[in-house]
């Protein structure tokens, strides 16, 4: 089914529906952080990125890395919606007879980098961006980072390096949903003004509401026209966005097993009756 | 200009070979880049920085970023040759190598200097005794430890031709050249550098020259020692290891690495499965290193030619 002309808002909604269905089917997974990135994934895959789902390893494609790999149910669903593989595969999340691994694996069509261990995604994206410059290719690389990624030292090494090298073909999108595994970010390891720190390392920083589709589109446009600097889109988001009883509730970080009733409640909360 | 080799018997640091083969391969092929973390002077890569600066990606002192980035560079089709000291490349960036490089089967070549007591005066923090153990435990990874400068250059060319992640050791201290120019190197193929019928020494790296020295000493005593250079530790050459067990009365393994988990362990795993044999392990005995000269430390740590000879005598029962 070609969904390319669907409104992005509807596509984001479909990502949320698919993600909770996959997590329910997989009997474990991380709904909170999957729901917070649904809007940015819709914009990236249906508006921003130049990809060919029929040729997932096309050398000149735009790259995407989900550094917060635990949110992959949303990514598998958007890849299925974009036509990389049938939706049934996304719904075989974490199953022994499927390929939708518990965390992203490059053997899955459309997955450009492994993740699941936080803090490595931005470096891998930086490497792709450096390879592109070396080979004089124009593809762009996008990396979604979570709060946990921002606490890993490896991410800051990549921020320092990308800023130093002025990698304007690299975009980081920070899904700042403010909750992490066991408590709030403020309680566990408050990082202060992340945007200010990243800007000091030579990045162009854009602040957006991470659930405002138009604001996200504008931010990616601005990133594309920004020269000599990598772009950091600081996306203020709500963990569990779209399912009222999950929003800003820590237990839905995951990894949770969703009962049939919880799935029904989730779909109802999303307006799917 | 043709690649120049050294003469057998010359004492040459393997890192000189690294620099030489990098410059040579930069003119031979366009498909690789060097990733450095501000230690090109130490690893031996410096000549490339002078000859082909456009082929060097500099990361500063941030090895985790360099290693994970190498996976991304490989995704674009380039072959990243990642080079730093083993303590940083193998240990600090171990998880980046495991997850970003090896799990994704990225075509990354990790070439690390500062291994074993071969490091000398820098002392324990730089003397890496754990790299062979930790790198060979990662799936999809080939582990290569060349014996001398000439073999390193041959091995490096084969490694560039090989598709998949590889870890290579680069020695620092002057090491006797054992191989002639242009000797054939095949990944996965052990090399019998001396025939013998009583005992076999299976060695890698700097220990190959010491094993040959021990074999000469023992010849005078009437003990015939075979020496096998196991320069590819993974995948291991099962046939050559089993042949040694079948045809000689015991095996001495010799490496400048902890005896726990290293080349000797790989040999023992192979023998236990295919042809149980008597084995004596020459290596670092599960201790940290210390400062000293490269020609003093092997004796202190029991990995000099005399130590190899003593182990051979025990197995030969003579």
Image (spheres, helix red, strand yellow):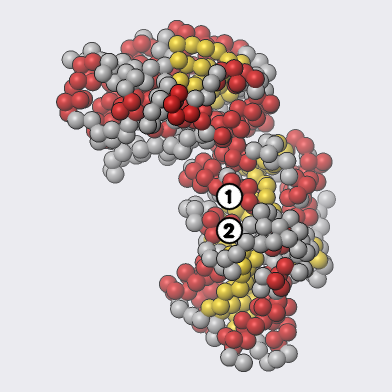
* Rendered residue at 38%/31% (across/down): A181
Asked if labels 1 and 2 touch by Cβ distance under 8 angstroms, the answer is yes
* Rendered residue at 45%/23% (across/down): A186
In this orientation, which residue lies closer to the viewer: A133 or B281? B281
- Is residue B161 visible in the rendered structure shown here? no
Residue B162 image position (x, y, % from top left): 59, 52
C-alpha span from label 2 to label 1: 8 Å
In this orientation, which residue lies closer to the viewer: B1 or B262? B262
Q: What residue sits right under mark 2 in the picture?
A: B130
Q: Is residue B28 left or right of residue A117?
A: right
Residue A112 image position (x, y, % from top left): 48, 33
Q: Establish if A119 lies above or below B23.
A: above
Q: Is residue A25 left or right of residue A58?
A: left
Q: Earlier in the sequence, mark 2 or mark 1?
A: 1
Res A47 → quadrant? top left
Other-residue count near label 2 (Cα within 10 Å), few / some / many at <14 / 14–19 / ≥20: many
What number is the disc on residue A258? none
* Rendered residue at 45%/7% (across/down): A214
Regarding mark 2 in the picture, which secondary structure is present there?
loop
Q: Is residue B9 left or right of residue B68?
A: right
Q: What residue sits right under mark 1 in the picture?
A: B91
In this orientation, which residue lies closer to the viewer: B142 or B257? B257
Q: Establish if B64 lies above or below A86.
A: below
Regarding mark 1 in the picture, which secondary structure is present there?
helix
Residue B156 image position (x, y, % from top left): 67, 54
Res B175 → quadrant? bottom right
The lab-note entry on whether marks 2 and 1 share a chain reads yes
Image quarter in which the C terminus of chain B is found? bottom right
In this orientation, which residue lies closer to the viewer: B185 or A217? A217
Chain hosting mark 1: B
Other-residue count near label 1 (Cα within 10 Å), few / some / many at <14 / 14–19 / ≥20: some
Q: Establish if A123 lies above or below A248.
A: below
């Amino acid at each position: 089914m070609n969904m390319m002309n669907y409104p992005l808002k509807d596509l984001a909604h479909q990502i949320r529906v698919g993600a909770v269905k996959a997590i329910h089917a997989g009997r474990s997974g991380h709904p909170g952080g999957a729901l917070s990135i649904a809007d940015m994934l819709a914009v990236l895959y249906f508006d921003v990125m130049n990809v060919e789902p029929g040729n997932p390893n096309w050398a000149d494609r735009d790259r995407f890395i989900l550094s917060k790999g635990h949110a992959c149910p949303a990514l598998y669903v958007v890849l299925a919606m974009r036509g990389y593989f049938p939706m049934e595969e996304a719904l075989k999340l974490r199953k022994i007879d499927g390929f939708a691994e518990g965390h992203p694996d490059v053997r899955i069509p459309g997955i450009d980098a492994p993740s699941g261990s936080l803090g490595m995604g931005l470096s891998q994206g930086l490497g792709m961006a450096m390879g592109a410059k070396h080979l004089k290719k124009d593809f762009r690389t996008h990396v979604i980072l979570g709060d946990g990624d921002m606490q890993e030292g490896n991410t800051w090494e990549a921020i320092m390096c990308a800023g130093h090298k002025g990698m304007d073909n690299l975009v980081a999108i920070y899904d700042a949903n403010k909750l992490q595994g066991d408590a709030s970010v403020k309680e566990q390891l408050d990082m202060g003004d992340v945007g200010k720190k990243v800007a000091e390392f030579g990045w162009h920083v854009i602040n957006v509401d991470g659930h405002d589709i138009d604001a996200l589109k504008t931010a990616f446009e601005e990133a594309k026209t920004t020269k000599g600097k990598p772009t950091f889109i600081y996306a203020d988001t709500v963990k569990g966005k779209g399912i009222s009883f999950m929003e800003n509730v820590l237990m839905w970080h995951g990894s949770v097993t969703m009962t049939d009733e919880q799935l029904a409640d989730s779909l109802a909360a999303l307006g799917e009756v | 200009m043709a690649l120049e080799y050294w003469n057998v018997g010359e004492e040459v640091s393997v890192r000189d070979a690294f620099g030489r083969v990098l410059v040579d391969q930069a003119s031979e092929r366009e498909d690789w880049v060097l990733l450095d973390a501000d230690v090109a002077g130490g690893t031996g890569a410096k000549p490339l920085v002078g000859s082909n600066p456009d082929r060097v990606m500099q990361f500063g002192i941030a090895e985790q970023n360099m290693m994970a980035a190498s996976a991304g560079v490989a995704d674009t089709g380039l072959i990243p040759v990642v080079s730093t000291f083993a303590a940083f490349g193998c240990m600090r960036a171990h998880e980046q190598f495991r997850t970003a490089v090896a799990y994704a089967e990225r075509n990354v070549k990790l070439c690390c200097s500062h291994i074993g007591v071969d490091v000398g005066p820098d002392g324990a923090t730089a003397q890496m005794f754990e790299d062979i153990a930790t790198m060979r435990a990662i799936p999809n990874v080939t582990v290569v430890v060349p014996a001398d400068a000439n073999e390193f250059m041959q091995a490096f060319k084969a490694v560039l031709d090989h598709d998949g992640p590889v870890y290579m050791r680069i020695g620092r201290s002057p090491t006797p050249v054992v191989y002639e120019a242009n000797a054939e190197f095949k990944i996965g193929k052990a090399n019998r550098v001396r025939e013998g019928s009583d005992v076999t020494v299976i060695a890698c790296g700097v220990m190959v020259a010491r094993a040959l020295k021990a074999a000469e000493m023992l010849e005078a005593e009437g003990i015939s020692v075979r020496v096998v250079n196991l320069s590819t530790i993974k995948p291991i050459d099962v046939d050559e290891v089993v042949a040694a067990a079948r045809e000689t009365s015991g095996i001495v393994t010799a490496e400048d690495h902890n005896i726990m988990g290293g080349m000797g362990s790989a040999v023992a795993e192979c023998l236990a499965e295919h042809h149980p044999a008597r084995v004596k392990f020459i290596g670092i005995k599960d201790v940290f290193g210390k400062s000293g000269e490269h020609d003093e430390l092997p004796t202190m740590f029991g990995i000099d030619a005399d130590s190899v000879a003593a182990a051979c005598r025990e197995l030969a029962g003579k």
